[in-house]
Image: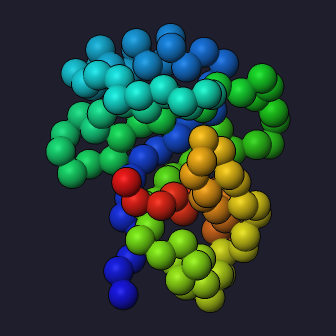
Amino acid sequence: MTSPRFEAVTIDCRDKHALATFWCALLGTTVRGEFGQYLGLHAATEGHPRLVFQQVDHLDEGRSRVHLDLDTEDLEADTARAVALGASVVQDVTDFGVQWRTLADPEGNLFCLVPAG
């Protein structure tokens, strides 16, 4: 059995392009791609997580603005393992032909299990 791999830190924002410009300059990296409300950067250092900016209409008080994305080879098995460790499933998301799952850790911090690749 493999464990999920730390893939990305996702940051909710008002202007994904402005934040990408700032972080690319600061970290010395470039934009990897853009899909709908998401804009991802290449990892600044190979093997390290990358940044993804998620543009949202409202930055709600009390909502997590930063969450982890974890690559998974087996969404169901890794979900079951996370739940057994104390996580709870928040929602299943299907967007851009990809399905991933949002969970909350025991203190309510959000993270996503995203199919590898």
Q: Residue furthest left?
A: 46
Looking at the image, residue 63 sits to the left or right of residue 74; the answer is right
**Residue 63 visible, this angle:** yes
Q: Where the C terminus falls, by quadrant? A: bottom left
User: Does 14 appear above or below 116?
Assistant: above
Where is residue 97? Give x, y as percent: 60, 48
Q: Residue at x 68, y 52 (%)?
A: 94
Where is residue 13? Give x, y as percent: 63, 25
Q: Residue at x 18, y 45 (%)?
A: 46
Q: How many marks?
A: 0
Where is residue 34? Give x, y as percent: 48, 26
**Residue 82 visible, this angle:** no
Looking at the image, residue 10 sits to the left or right of residue 4; the answer is right
Q: Residue furthest front?
A: 97
Where is residue 58? Give x, y as percent: 80, 25
User: Does 90 appear above or below 59?
Assistant: below
Q: Residue at x 35, y 23 (%)?
A: 31
Q: Where the N terminus falls, by quadrant? A: bottom left
Q: Residue at x 21, y 51 (%)?
A: 47
Looking at the image, residue 107 sits to the left or right of residue 97; the answer is right
Closer to the camera in the image, 19 or 38: 38
Image quadrant where residue 25 sits? top left
Colour basis: rainbow
